[in-house]
Amino acid sequence: MSSFRRANLHLRARIIQAVREFFVSRGFLEVETPHRIPGNAPEEHIEPARAGAGYLHTSPELCMKRLLCRGYGNIFQICRCWRDNERGRRHVPEFTMLEWYRCDSDYSDIMRDCQELLEQVVRTACGGTTLSYQGREIRFGDSTRRITVREAFERFGGTTMEAALADGTFDEIMVTAIEPGLAQDTPVFLVDYPAEMAALARLKPGDPSVGERFELYAGGLELANGFSELNDPREQRTRFLEANARRSRAGLPPLPLPEPFLADLSNMPPAAGIALGIDRLVMLCADAERIDDVIAFTPEEL
């Protein structure tokens, strides 16, 4: 094991401890939910890993939301997740996820959590509120910025959000133009994704063309995906069926619907939640270019 990776594993342990202390100090309940489940939320761009008669969870999202429905209040979890066919400089098929959920909240409350969490983690890792990642200095704290997806396409993409959706270039433009165009000297919230790309998010009051969904970036790294939660079981079922239809058109098998989740959903209070990649957070704090440098074993080493 390289000395760089060894140092990063020590840093990783400190970061996870800081994350846990952040949520416990704010009254969140730490929970553990099953890793093998009958079905994940169907999505066309995420392929779950089979595990016997079920699947390994791609996220603890569904079980955590069922706990919200049962009155558990604000909760968080740090756990392993699995997604097939994901391997690259920033991806591995098995990774560590942080998820948390707030009751009686929306995505603005979760963004505020993110801002405060990042500041605490960076203080733990770096002893201050700035760090250097891949040659860029990034400031944390009150300097966080927000930009809507619609505005980002007009400023950096040379087209409109709607046109990119219509001609199938949305994802390509996002990677090649939008993400590089975002501010690099401070964390950025990219907010209000098109409704078609907000499968589990509540639509924005006054503008149903977008969902109350955001992604968090820092130094060019996508760290997290959060949203105000949809709690309408009929609408959620329709969106799951649409996702399976898109999978079928792409030549992928449909996925089972998570019926127990749908049965509980009408009992969910107004809430918001987020999934944040722990491995990428450690990459950021360690100034690591590859995810391989912040995990104990890569898939190829097993």
Image: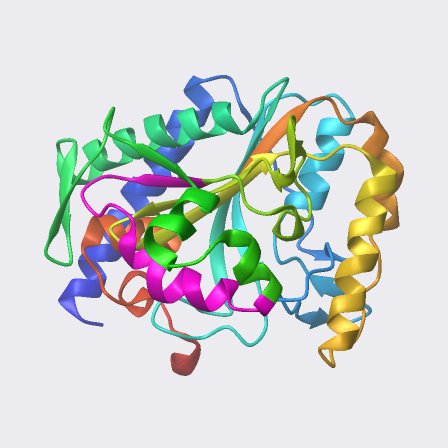
- Based on the picture, tell me whether residue 169 belongs to the magenta stretch: yes
The x, y position of residue 295, in whole percent, is 34, 63
Locate residue 47 relative to residue 94 in the image: left or right.
right
Locate residue 122 relative to residue 269 in the image: left or right.
left
> Which of these two is toward me, 253 or 197?
197
Is there any visible trace of residue 135 in the rendered image? yes
Above or below, 81 relative to 182: below
The x, y position of residue 250, in whole percent, is 71, 77
The residue at the point 66 percent across, 67 percent down is 48
- Based on the picture, tell me whether residue 154 belongs to the magenta stretch: no
Above or below, 75 relative to 96: above
Q: What segment is highlighted magenta in the picture?
A: 167-190
> Which of these two is toward me, 126 or 211?
211
The x, y position of residue 172, in whole percent, is 45, 69
Q: Quadrant of the N terminus?
A: bottom left
Above or below, 29 relative to 233: above
The colour scheme applied to this rendered structure is rainbow
Is there any visible trace of residue 178 in the rendered image? no
Locate residue 289 relative to residue 18 in the image: left or right.
left
> Which of these two is toward me, 52 or 270?
270
Q: Quadrant of residue 229?
A: top right
The residue at the point 37 percent across, 70 percent down is 297
The residue at the point 44 percent across, 30 percent down is 111
The x, y position of residue 160, in whole percent, is 48, 53
Locate residue 140 relative to residue 115 in the image: left or right.
left
> Which of these two is toward me, 222 or 211?
211
The residue at the point 85 percent across, 30 percent down is 266
